[in-house]
Amino acid sequence: MKFDFTRWLPAIATNPNRKTTLSVVGVTALAGLAFGPTAVAAPLANSPHEGAVAAIDKATGQETAVTTAESATERADRASSSKPSRSELIPHGVQGLQSRVPLDDAQRQNAKTIIEVAKRTGVGERGAVIGIATALQESKLYNLGHLGAYNDHDSQGLFQQRPSSGWGTEAQITDPEYSSNAFFQALKNVDGWRDMPLTAAAQTVQVSAYPFHYAQWEEQAAEVVSQLW
């Protein structure tokens, strides 16, 4: 099901740390809207993918990242030299009917942040598409604050990550740069993620109650990456 988010999302409030967070306390139009439990939203006792668990430690500084022959910066510099091709963005083709929402300046800025972090972490164009598609499903690319009665547990931010699941503090997970980095570190810990369909890669990290919903955003995510890369 598609929603016209522009009808209910409130004005954007900017906090002192330059993080834009949305709050919708008292907005009854959100009733019944599912942001989907994330990996993030499910207790670790539910045994999410071991790569996602390991990535929580890595993203929160409890594990030292392994360096590779080619640094993330080098890969980013190489990748930024040209626009990515469709085969790089959607190597497995889209699955099912595609959804689309118009993007405002705040959403595009969050998309730019996800792309920049994708470059720095070395997940490249494909990783950026997965990240943006995931954020489109979880938050429609808005950096959501706590939604009061409509919140999914303590999930917040672009990727609806949870402090109680170890993803960071509330301030950290509502920082688009931090939350994007945490998502991509988790993705990198999923064996074979580059060869997976988008919805499978995203679901392995997010452990959502709606595992196939990520697929519907692949086309728009690829277009956004192509435009902003």
Image (spheres, helix red, strand yellow):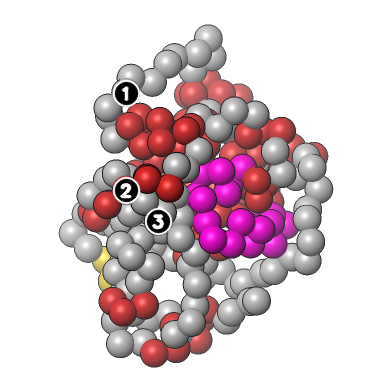
User: Left or right: 165 with respect to 142?
Assistant: left
The span picked out in magenta is 201-221
Instruction: Please identify, in this view, whether the residue under mark 1 or under mark 2 is nearer the observer.
Output: 2
| Secondary element at tag 1 | loop
Q: Earlier in the sequence, mark 2 or mark 3?
A: 3
- Residue placed most toward the observer, 139 or 193: 193
Residue 86 visible somewhere in the drawing = no
Task: Name the residue at 57% across, 81% down.
Answer: 4
**Which corner quadrant holds the N terminus?**
bottom right
SS for dot 2 = helix
Residue named by callout 2: 165
Number of residues whose C-alpha sits closer than 10 Å to that of mark 1, classed few (under 14), some (14–19) or many (20 or more): few
**Disc 1: which residue:** 63
> Along the line of sight, which residue is nearer the eye, 116 or 178?
178
CA distance for labels 2 and 3: 7 Å
Q: What residue lies at 65% left-to-right and 39% top-to-bottom?
A: 126
- Amino acid marked by disc 2: Ser
- The residue under the point 74% across, 37% down is 88
Question: Among all residues in the image, which is located at the extreme top?
Answer: 69
Per the picture, the main secondary structure of the magenta-coloured stretch is helix
Dot 3: element: loop
